[in-house]
Image (cartoon, rainbow, N blue to C red):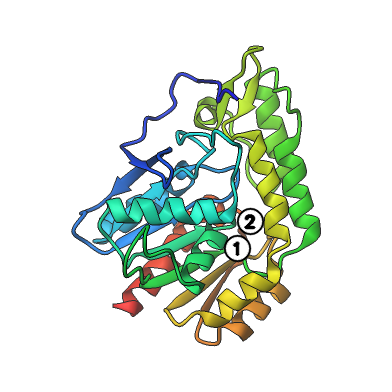
Amino acid sequence: MNAGTKLPGTPKPSRIWRGWDGNSIAGDTWGNPSSQLVMLLHGGGQTRHAWKGTGEMLGAHGYFAVAIDARGHGDSDWSSDGMYSQEIMALDLLSVLKQLDCSAPVLVGASMGGITSLLVSGEPQNSEVMENFSPKGLVMVDIAPKTESKGVTRIGNFMTHKPEGFDSLEEVAEWISAYQPHRKKKSDLKGLAKNLRLNENGKYCWHWDPRFMTMRKEIQNREERLNKCTRALSIPTLLVRGGLSDILSEEGARDFLQQCGHAKYVNITDAAHMVAGDRNDIFGQSVLKFLSEMD
């Protein structure tokens, strides 16, 4: 399958790494590479650009922040076989960390990226990919083992709408606004370029590989595995929930906190599932406070 043609104004990644099978993994970095590494992993259907504000804040406060595009997303390669299992996402992460020569990162993961982060933190990892992997801390962003099926279905419907593509940027903006009514609709549509591609029919399609959606079904069936990972956590852990989220409920957050008794918790009342995008100021300060208390 073809990833489509990038739109003018799409930012180029500052770095390219190799995934576990040689796939290109695109990313951006902020701060001094000799400082503590904070890996930023976006949610399904997002890109590294979701972390721009957070990355800049972390870099300005003395950390080395790295945000990558998951395979099949943004500027990273699509899987030739259409496989996007959570194991593959984890192997990609370990491969990038090996190239960064860091076995003790702090992992910050939103939604899908949070699941990847939880799995690599709560289960033994493949030493052939990376030796002595031992994350220093974990930040889970609006995700936990127990999620709300209604919200998961809603985001799936958003992502699969109009698979043939949109006719205009205005139509894309209307669809995004309908999904995120709590956000003020933007009049400047240039920022959409990084999230879209032009398909062979000249229509605007999302940047991700549509075959990725099969992985979302896999995620929904992994609650017990994720519960085991949660109970196995011994590293400093922070759970951040968007108060308006329909993915992670307060009940789901409490369930996570009961299983990981040492975890800290922040509820950002006027943010929805995409917490960093809604209130990056409060989110960034919450992460910085957590990091400072780890030191």
Q: Amino acid at mark 2?
A: His
Q: Which residue is the site of mark 1?
A: 142
The structure residue drawn at horizontal position 66% and vertical position 19%, both measured from the top left corner, is 168
Q: Position of residue 21 (x, y in %)?
A: 43, 43
**Secondary element at image label 1:** loop
The structure residue drawn at horizontal position 57% and vertical position 28%, both measured from the top left corner, is 196
Left or right of residue 10: residue 87: right
Q: Which residue is the site of mark 2?
A: 273
The image's mark for residue 101 is none
**Secondary element at image label 2:** loop
Q: Earlier in the sequence, mark 2 or mark 1?
A: 1
Tag 2–tag 1 contact (CB < 8 Å): yes
Alpha-carbon neighbours of circle 2 within 10 Å: few (<14), some, or many (≥20)? many
Residue furthest front in the image: 128
Q: Amino acid at mark 1?
A: Asp
Report if residue 88 is visible in the image.
Answer: yes
Q: Position of residue 220 (x, y in %)?
A: 72, 59
